[in-house]
Image: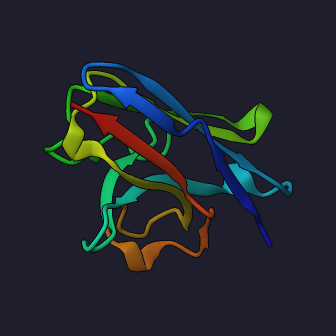
Amino acid sequence: QVQLVESGGGLVQAGGSLRLSCAASGRTFSTYALGWFRQAPGKEREFVAPTAWSDGSTPAADSVKGRFTSSRDNAKNTGYLQMNSLKPEDTAVYYCALRPYGSSPSNIKSYAYWGQGTQVTVSS
């Protein structure tokens, strides 16, 4: 079993930046691929970005491409989502999740472990 805890969310003005962290318990973090999702009120959970190490050929969602960068530090059992040039439409609860390597990065059903989410609110 792996437990994930996100942190780093908050309220930021449009154009600002935030860095989300995803801390994993257990020794098996490095054996899973990491992805980021978000869910806005009244909308379905959507794929945001894979991590660079595990999904080098998988692009981030068009809505965040060029603004969000994902990464991971296996030595620290932690993943990160750097979010720049934030827009009001980025407001959502952000989740990190783990999936087995070889499964589809953008398919929500690929992911076996989820964090509890962290709220990001971008004001205009």
Q: Residue at x 78, y 33 (%)?
A: 76
* Quarter occupied by the N terminus: bottom right
In this view, the residue in front, 54 or 12, is 12
Residue 13 coordinates in the image, percent (x, y): 32, 24
Farthest-out residue, bottom: 109
Q: Residue at x 54, y 66 (%)?
A: 99
Count of labels in the image = 0
Residue 59 in sight from this viewpoint: no
Farthest-out residue, left: 62
Q: Residue at x 56, y 58 (%)?
A: 117
Residue 18, placed above or below residue 27? above
| Residue 50 horizontal side relative to residue 5, left or right | left
Residue 58 coordinates in the image, percent (x, y): 28, 47
Residue 110 coordinates in the image, percent (x, y): 44, 75
* Quarter occupied by the C terminus: top left
Q: Residue at x 44, y 52 (%)?
A: 36
Residue 10 in sight from this viewpoint: yes
Residue 30 coordinates in the image, percent (x, y): 69, 49
Residue 83, placed above or below residue 109? above
